[in-house]
Amino acid sequence: MNYFYPVNLIVFGFLLTALLGLISSWVDRKVTAMVQYRVGPPLLQPLVDIVKLLGKETLVPAGASRGAFLLAPLVGLAGVVASSTVLWGNLLRPSTSFAGDWIVILYLLTVPSLGIILGGFASRNPLASLGASREMKLVLSYELPFVLAMLVPVIRSGGSIRLGDILSSQFANGANAGSLSGIIALVVAVLCIQAKLALVPFDAPEAETEIVSGPLIEYSGAALAVYRLAKNMLLFVLPFFLGIMFLGGFRLHGIEILWSVLKFVGVLALITVIRNTNPRVRIDQATRFFWGPVAILGAAAVVLALLGL
Amino acid sequence: MSMTLKALLKSPWVFHLSTGSCNNCDIEVLDCLTPRFDVERFGILLAGSIRHSDVLLVTGSCNRMSVERLKKLYDQVPKPCLVVGIGTCAGSRGVFIDSYNCPVPLDHIIPVDVYIPGCPPKPEAIIAGVVKLIQKVGNG
């Protein structure tokens, strides 16, 4: 019996990712506060928010689909936990990397969005439905450039769709972001994860000022806590995935720990600064942006990678 | 004090509810959320949806049209929740006390935990009021 998988799932996939996700959420809020010249929340604030929500009443709106409404946050959380488990497995024991885990990750990272869409439609609220339909359009918009950007590391590592091979080719030849095609793909990927996290400028699904947090509008108590936890964990998992694909991965020994933390915080701070210095775009503008310039840029990066640049 | 209540006092998300105020109190409430006063230091966030909120900030004199909505919204807040009456109108109906349109004061409609007087109260007064509310609930 191999104990690595269950331990990885519970300790690294869930607990450590949740902890790091809460810290990422704090970094995000603190950087936002610094951009706006204010002090910002204390370190434990995201954790306190989750604990508070867990203790509150969970209301199910009248006429809502009860099962789907309460199940949707768990679907989202399960998607994040599964994807972070695969990533941690790669980092801690490279031998657990299997052929095609690249596809599995791309697939699992769509599940949190599906959870939000499910919850939004199940809650029988016009604003939630509107938000869920926008989320659906956003998923359709960013998936194409995201996959194109993620193809670049695959091509550069000789066409292997194993994360382990992508990592070892980066250890041998330097990080993917060091090449022309890599850096273009990184820019495309950062724009796509901005949309995946539903942050400004692509926060049309959750626009606070027009459709008051969209699909989450009817959620309260423990269900909302699970959603927030899943979102915070996603805020950790996506920069982590980007680090593995483009920035040479993370190594956990000696001085490398410092570099790993710096890489991660760098990507996170970049996302936060983008979200604080941009206005929200409409959903049609977002779709046009992703299918137009961003997809073309992603395709150009793929062509450059095929040419070996 | 229970864990839930302790956490609630450290992250009170406020919902802003105007029951026919002249908007001055609303502007002062929004002032508290600006970088100058930065109430996010204490975990206070403005919740857009009533389902996410812990503290109801009620402004205005509770006129006939808004009383029904006020009751409905109070029923929709996930409990435990706290209610703060902001401004003279919410406290005593102010100059509208003899009006046909403001039949009952706020605390006859829903239970109120703290009043913050002023027309409108300064942001400093609102923060002081919220601190007193936190102390009051914290001491049981």
Image (cartoon, rainbow, N blue to C red):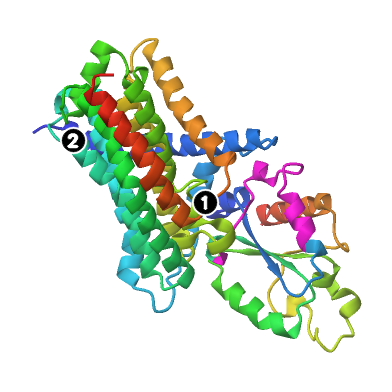
Chain letter for the residue marked with disc 2 in the picture: A
Within 10 Å of disc 1 (Cα), the crowding (few <14, some 14-19, many 20+) is some
Residue B137 x %, y %? 67, 56
Q: Earlier in the sequence, mark 2 or mark 1?
A: 2
Vertical comparison of B63 with A144: above or below: below
Residue A149 seen anywhere in this rendered image of the structure: no
Q: Residue A281: which disc?
A: 1
How far separated are the C-alphas under marks 2 and 1?
Answer: 33 Å
> Hey, what amino acid is under mark 1?
Val
Say which residue label 2 marks. Answer: A101
Q: Quadrant of residue B116?
A: bottom right
Q: Nearer the viewer, mark 2 or mark 1?
A: 1
B17 and B43: which is toward the camera: B17
At horizontal 54% and vertical 41% (from top left) the residue drawn is A275
User: Total marks drawn?
Assistant: 2
Chain letter for the residue marked with disc 1 in the picture: A
Vertical comparison of B55 with A150: above or below: below
Instruction: Decide whether residue B93 is among the magenta residues.
Output: no
Q: Quadrant of residue A145?
A: top left
Residue A134 x %, y %? 42, 59
> Hey, what amino acid is under mark 2?
Asp
Residue range in magenta is B26-50
Same subunit, labels 2 and 1: the answer reads yes
Residue B138 x %, y %? 66, 52
SS at mark 1 in the image = loop
Q: Quadrant of residue B84?
A: bottom right
Vertical comparison of A252 with B115: above or below: above
Q: Is residue B16 left or right of residue B91?
A: left
At horizontal 33% and vertical 24% (from top left) the residue drawn is A182
At horizontal 18% and vertical 35% (from top left) the residue drawn is A101
Residue A240 x %, y %? 36, 31
B80 and A164: which is toward the camera: A164
